[in-house]
Image: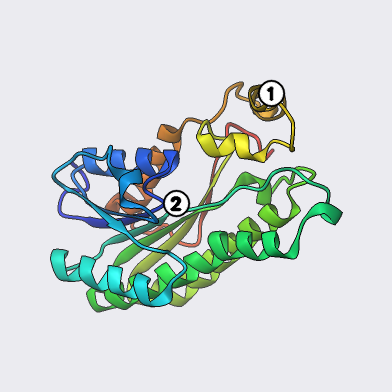
Amino acid sequence: MELSEKVVVVTGAGGGMGKAISEKLLAEGARVIGMDLKEESMKDQDHSQFTAVAVDILDEEAVAGAFAEAHKQSGKIDGLVNAIGMAQSASPIEDVSLELWHKLMNVNVTSLFLTSKEAAKYMKKQNQGSIITIASISAVRPRPGLQAYIASKGAAESFSRALAIELAPHGIRVNTVHPGPTDTGMLGQFAASGADVETTKKQIFADSVPMGRLVAPSDIAESISYLISDRAAMVTGAVLHVDGGRGL
């Protein structure tokens, strides 16, 4: 129960990766406030230490209210895991609309700004905290046709590194995790329009991992548990690849 007494906000808690992260943190003793667009997406998280909060993560006022309520109920916020994310169907750049570009940037980057901004307010008062952003190994080793998604994940990493140096004097650590191809429902969304999803997951994604398999959501959850914990007390500004060697 290494995370006992810690209060952690997990965005995107209704997704496959967010769910695995929440379950791991709960198993380690943390209290988890899951935030996602719809409360019913988190209904499987049946745990006395889990609180589901429906919030539009791109609504500044709603995000501020959700964090204020979380702090009011728990008395503190020790961690923030930004697990929310949006995929891009592989497409040549001339087929990518400006609307899609803006949507990817909003979900994958602007959301980080809004949640981290709120978390920092409370963490500064405590002079401690841990913020973790889930980005993507594609920011390091790009794939064709995912230019907008990859740009958003590169921005997510840069934002986290900038925040790490800004918040270090306040005892707040900020780190990035770059997952490799992860076996969640989101992975199939990267397939090109009309492509067979299962074939794409095997031939395009799994076969590209030197260690020979897709990353499991639990692999990501293990890294999050470490970065939230006091074992990582001097780890900040780091970029951790949990990718089975995909970035090499």
- Badge 1 vs badge 2, beta-carbon distance below 8 Å: no
Which residue is depicted at the point 31% across and 59% down? 79
Q: Amino acid at mark 1?
A: Asp
Residue at the spot x=30%, y=39% of the render? 24
Left or right: where 215 falls relative to 141: left
Residue 81 in picture, x, y percent from top left: 39, 55
Residue where numbered disc 2 is placed: 83
Q: Which label sits on residue 207?
A: 1
Of pointers 1 and 2, the one earlier in the residue sequence? 2
Q: How is the image coloured?
A: rainbow
Q: Secondary structure at mark 2?
A: loop
Given residues 65 and 39, the one toward you in this image is 39
In the rendered view of the protein, which quadrant contains the C terminus?
top right
Q: Is residue 197 left or right of residue 133?
A: right
Q: Tell me where residue 32 appears, x and y as whole percent.
A: 24, 51
Placement of 223 over or under 218, stated as above or below: below
Q: Is residue 204 left or right of residue 127?
A: right
The part of the image, by quadrant, that contains residue 107 is bottom right
Q: Nearer the viewer, residue 213 or 98?
A: 98
- Disc 2 marks which amino acid? Ala
Q: CA distance from mark 1 to mark 2?
A: 25 Å
Give the class, few, some or many, for how many residues have Cα within 10 Å of label 2's Cα (few <14, many ≥20): many
